[in-house]
Amino acid sequence: MSIPQSKSLHCLNLGRWFLFTLAAATISGCALTPHKPQAREQSAALLSAQLAAAETQLKNSPADSTQHIYVGSAQHSQSLAFQQDVLSVQQKLQTLNTEMVSILMSNQMETQQLKYPFATIPNLQLVFDKLATWSKQHTLSLTLLITTHGAPDILSVNIGNSYFQPVRSEQLKSWLNKLHPRTQMTIILSACHSGSFADTLIGENRIVLTAAAADRKSFGCAYQDKNTWFIAQLLGPHFKPENTWSQVFVATRDGVELQEKAQKISLYSNPQMRSPEALNRNTLAQWYSRRPSPKSHLSPLHQ
């Protein structure tokens, strides 16, 4: 999502944006950010605890089964919708696999105590280094959600009204490529222009879903929104065990378009999917089962 500029095409109206900006300016000076040692210590401790718990759970899991890991990264503090996206996806995935391991990061403007570790480049790097190690020891299935404001080849990182180094497509690709090639991946990007990442991230065992085409904006990032529109539609009634990924994506794309039409948005976000055809035919129940998924081969991709 990019920061809105007009009443009809963007997710925040002028009045709400003014009130949020005023509030942000008031508290940003005392917000917990990576600039403050005590905040860095809190974040490091929270992330360390999550990684330790994940490692313990992996070690105690059956050696001959696929271990599912969910990584959620809510990277912009100027909307509550991003953190809610991360939590909503976690809740939905747990209905498909109750043994799923979760690692959650979120940037909010807490002024006293962090609830989640910062969603920053150093923390993402640490998580992916761990994932790379684990993927050589276990058969993994990774679901990654990054939700934030975006621009072409940029997934923003904002904490306490300050910007930090953004995530770019080549950086994300390099992290993903560190994992063992057998690793099954579901990569979900909910941000404006997130389609600019899609072709870079294509892989043999990867499903890539983006909220918008490379040249389009996406919506639902008002400060108090429950979810971004893409994630809300993705997790709709079609997100059920018996449906295939292809069916889920088509229903999600159509639902987003209907919502945009209802709001009289003239330039639709046009969500994207990139994946081998063999993977598209997997039902969610198959994809999130405990059994290793068969090796697949690249074939025509959805656009």
Image (spheres, rainbow, N blue to C red):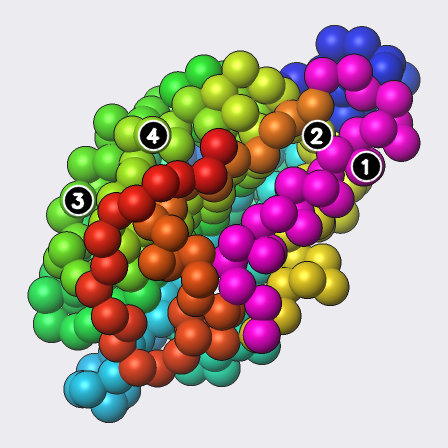
- Which residue is label 2 attached to? 219
Tag shown at residue 199 = 4
Q: Callout 1, which amino acid?
A: Gln
Q: Callout 3, which amino acid?
A: Asn
Q: Are marks 4 and 3 in contact (CB under 8 Å)?
A: no
Measured as percent of width and height from the top left, residue 221 is found at 70, 32
Q: Residues within 10 Å of mark 1 (few under 14, many from 20)?
A: some
SS type, badge 2: loop
Q: Callout 2, which amino acid?
A: Phe
Tag shown at residue 290 = none
Q: Which residues are magenta?
A: 242-267
Q: CA distance from mark 2 to mark 3?
A: 30 Å
Q: CA distance from mark 4 to mark 3?
A: 14 Å
- The residue sitting at 22% across, 53% down in the picture is 297
Measured as percent of width and height from the top left, residue 179 is found at 17, 53
- Which residue is label 3 attached to? 177
- Camera-side mark, 3 or 1: 1
Measured as percent of width and height from the top left, residue 143 is found at 40, 57
- Camera-side mark, 2 or 1: 1
Q: Earlier in the sequence, mark 2 or mark 1?
A: 2
Magenta stretch: helix, strand or loop mostly = helix
SS type, badge 3: helix
Most foreground residue, 106 or 300: 300
Quarter of image, res 264: top right
**Depicted 18 relative to depicted 105: above or below:** above
- Camera-side mark, 4 or 3: 4
Quarter of image, res 247: bottom right
Q: CA distance from mark 4 to mark 1?
A: 26 Å
Q: CA distance from mark 2 to mark 1?
A: 10 Å
The N terminus appears in which quarter of the rendering?
Answer: top right
Q: How many marks?
A: 4
Residue 244, magenta (yes or no): yes
